Image: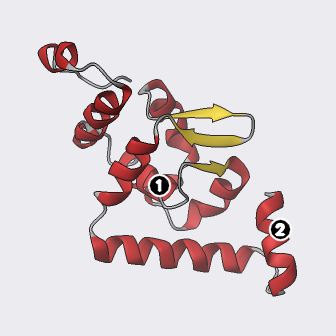
């Protein structure tokens, strides 16, 4: 599945930043499962390990992030680099993150933290190591 592009708008763009802005402006064309998944991804910054995403099935609607990775990759929003899911441009990540309503963003961060906290050891010293290893 690909985004629908406004050809005239695309021709007028000349930089990677503009392309990133165009992708962010097309977020409304994402399916009901893709947008929440992309929002969850954006909470981790520019990249996140696939093994960490696997732990988020409980908090993301529509079965977690993984079922939507293929379409997000095909849409040019993210890419796989080894075991990492990486936004194709930092402005895409920022645009997705900044478009999450403030209260929803707070709730999403809390849910991610609680979910990850329940799945890793509660020992503070080993918790950081476990998350880095995932």
Examine the rendered structure and indicate whether residue 7 appears above or below residue 25. above
Relative horizontal placement of residue 38, taking residue 55 as reference (left or right)? left
| Residue sitting at x 28%, y 30% | 18
Looking at the picture, tell me which residue is in the foreground, 97 or 66: 97
Q: Quadrant of the C terminus?
A: bottom right
Q: Give percent across and percent down for residue 11.
A: 20, 12
Relative horizontal placement of residue 56, taking residue 103 as reference (left or right)? right
Examine the rendered structure and indicate whether residue 85 appears above or below residue 81. below
Q: Residues within 10 Å of mark 2 (few under 14, many from 20)?
A: few
Looking at the picture, tell me which residue is in the foreground, 65 or 77: 77
Q: Give percent across and percent down for residue 115.
A: 61, 74
Looking at the picture, tell me which residue is in the foreground, 90 or 99: 90
Q: CA distance from mark 2 to mark 1?
A: 21 Å
Residue with the mark numbered 1: 42
Q: Residues within 10 Å of mark 1 (few under 14, many from 20)?
A: many
Q: How is the image coloured?
A: secondary structure
Quadrant in the picture for residue 1: top left
| Residue sitting at x 28%, y 19% | 14
In the rendering, which numbered label is found on residue 130?
2
Kind of element beneath mark 1 = helix
Kind of element beneath mark 2 = helix
Q: Give percent across and percent down for residue 36.
A: 39, 55
Which comes before the other along the chain, label 2 or label 1? 1
| Residue sitting at x 66%, y 72% | 116
Residue, far left: 8
**Mark 2–mark 1 contact, CB under 8 Å?**
no
Q: Give percent across and percent down for residue 114.
A: 59, 80
């Amino acid at each position: 599945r690909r985004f629908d592009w406004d050809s005239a708008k695309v021709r007028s763009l000349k930089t990677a930043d503009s392309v990133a802005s165009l992708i962010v402006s097309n977020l409304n064309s994402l399916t009901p499962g893709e947008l929440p998944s992309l929002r969850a991804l954006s909470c981790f910054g520019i990249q996140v390990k696939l093994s960490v995403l696997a732990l988020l099935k409980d908090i993301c609607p529509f079965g977690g992030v993984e079922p939507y990775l293929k379409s997000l990759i095909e849409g040019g929003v993210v890419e796989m680099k080894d075991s990492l899911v990486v936004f194709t441009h930092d402005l895409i990540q920022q645009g997705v993150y900044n478009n999450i309503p403030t209260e929803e963003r707070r709730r999403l961060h809390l849910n991610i933290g609680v979910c990850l906290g329940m799945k890793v050891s509660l020992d503070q010293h080993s918790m950081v190591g476990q998350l880095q290893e995932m």
